[in-house]
Structure formats: C-alpha cells, structure tokens
Image (spheres, grey):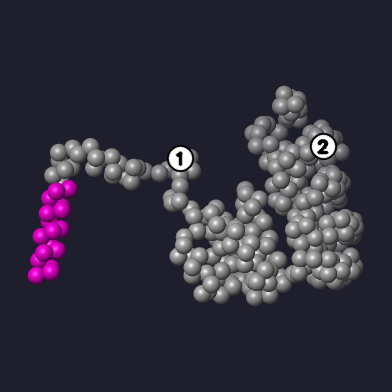
Amino acid sequence: MRISNWRTTSLAATAFLLGSIAAGSGSLRAAWEPIARFISLEDPPSPASANVLSEHEITMLDETTPQSQAELLLERSINHYRGANEQIAARVGRWRGKIELNERLHNLFTTAINSDDLTVRVAGIEVDIAARDLVKDSSTVDRLEAVARSGEQGPRVNALWDLALIGNRGVGQDRILDVLLSSTHDENVNIRYWAVEGLAYLAVDASIEPLLDIFHDDPSPMIRERAACGLAQSGMFSAAQRSTAVPRLLDFAIDGALDAETHTWVFQALRDITGQTLPHDAARWREWYKAQR
C-alpha cells in the first residue's frame, strides 16, 4: 500500500510539474532558471554556499584528533570559511607537538602560504609552527640562534626557517633579522637561499632594502630570483610594504649592470606588486608611476 501511494503521489506531482511547465508558469521558471545557468571560467567569482563553518563541524571538532582538526580547519581557512581562522587561533596552542606535516597537511600548508589573503597565510604559518613543535617565545630564539649562525647545513636551514616563522608572529624580530642578514652573505648558496626566504617570511619593514640589494647584487641567479619573488609575491609582506620597493625596481629597470634575465624579473616583480600589465619598457613604467604620484 505504501509503495502504491508513493507512486500515486509521485505521478501526481510529475503531472503537476509538467502541466505547470506547459502552462509557462512564471514562478517555476524563476525558480529553475538560476539553477540551470551555465557557469563558465570567464564568469566573475560566484559563491557556491554561504561559506561559513557549520555548527555540525564545530561540534564534531572536539571528537576528532588534533591532526584531523588542523587539516579540516586549514582547508576551510583556504576557502575563506567564516569562523575557520578563529577556530585555528583557539586550538593551535593545543596542537603543538601533536600534529605532523604529513602529505595532506603539507599540501594544504603550501596552498595556504600562496594564498592572496594574508590571513590565510598566517593560518598556514601557525599550523606549521605547531607541526614543528615550536614555542613562540624568546627561549626558541636562544635555542636556535647559534645553529642558525654556524651549524651544519641541514640543521642550519631548519633553524633559519623556524626563526623566520616565529619572528613573523612577533617573537624576537630584531635578533632574528640580525641572524638572517648575517646568513645572506654566506658562501653556501643553500644557506643564502633560506636566509632570503626567511627575510620574506619575517616580513619586517627592515627586510625590504636588504632583499633589494640581494636581488641586485647576489652572484647566484637562483638567489636573485628568490629575492625578487619575496619582494613581489611570496612571503608575508603586505601589499603596502611591497609597494615601497617600486622606486628602486624602476631604477633596476634602467640599470645596465644587470643581465637580461634579471631585467625580466624586475618587470615581473613590478607587475606582481602593482597589478599593472605594461610592456617590459622602463620608460612606460616610469610614466605610469609618475602619473600615480
């Protein structure tokens, strides 16, 4: 009997819908047309949902492991779910030493630190600090400073990275800046690489001029490129901080001492910082900059 009633109801509903469609029901057309709309890659951003962390997810968090919490919340942060960063801030202290940067969390971390939103990058850094079991106070600077200055390559680059991360969160920034700057002159290119990365992630105002100098003067193309990336897009500088590099980059654009490859990176950096799509032409860039000022 239940099956028969269900079929009868279903058929009646179907007949009603078909009749409504045939009659050209305005309300039905209004309900279905937005759903049927084809979304193309050229369309402006279109929300798929209210992108808010659900009550169910928040309730279930305490029943999952710290690893699962970190993975879910960092994913939600990357997708700009409201409430995700607040949950990370409330829980990340309890994750320290209890999560690991496994393949999934490492991939999420990489995505987070390449986000166009600095708050998402911060979420990624906080998760990485917890996974690396770092205490965010001066005791960590005391423990790592000697290794970061003169340790063996492996421990040293890890120490440089660890110091940059906690420095970005406001710990011992002057001391850490000094450690990183001293390492930018090391003869070992791998040490210089991580010192440059560290300056971009420490992201204090005093990091910018040294990065510009490295971009201009370092003998290694790899290091010059990393300095350019740190100034233009990667790391933790704000858009306002990056814009302060533009005048010197304009000088670099007409500097005959720089090779063609470095000149290309100069124009790429200018585009990334300003959002302007101009030819690789120093005069055009100077005209644009003068008009803005």
Q: Where in the figure is residue 200, as x and y percent of width and height?
A: 76, 52
Residue 164 picture quarter: bottom right
Residue 76 picture quarter: bottom right
- Range drawn in magenta: 1-17
Element type where label 1 sits in the image: loop
Tell me the amino acid under the disc marked 2: Arg
Up-down: is 269 above or below 147? above
Q: In which quarter of the image is the C terminus?
A: top right
- 271 relative position to 252: left or right: left
| Residue under pointer 2 | 248
Camera sees residue 221: no
Element type where label 2 sits in the image: helix
Tell me the amino acid under the disc marked 1: Asp
Q: Dot 2, how many residues are within 10 Å of its Cα: few (below 14), some (14-19), or many (20+)?
A: some
The one of 27 and 256 positioned closer to us in this rendering: 27
Q: Where in the figure is residue 210, as x and y percent of width and height?
A: 85, 48
Q: Where in the figure is residue 70, as x and y percent of width and height?
A: 59, 67
Residue 220: give its label.
Answer: none
Question: Residue, x 67% and y 31% (percent of image)?
Answer: 278
Looking at the image, do the residues carrying marks 2 and 1 touch, with CB atoms under 8 Å apart? no
Q: Where in the figure is residue 115, as x and y percent of width and height?
A: 62, 52
Up-down: is 292 above or below 38? above
Query: What whole-number distance in Å separates the C-alpha atoms at marks 2 and 1?
Result: 37 Å
- Secondary structure predominantly adopted by residues drawn in magenta: helix
The one of 177 and 186 positioned closer to us in this rendering: 177
Camera sees residue 4: yes
Question: Residue, x 84% and y 48% (percent of image)?
Answer: 206
| Residue under pointer 1 | 43
Residue 228 counted in the magenta span = no
- 91 relative position to 15: left or right: right
First in sequence: mark 2 vs mark 1: 1
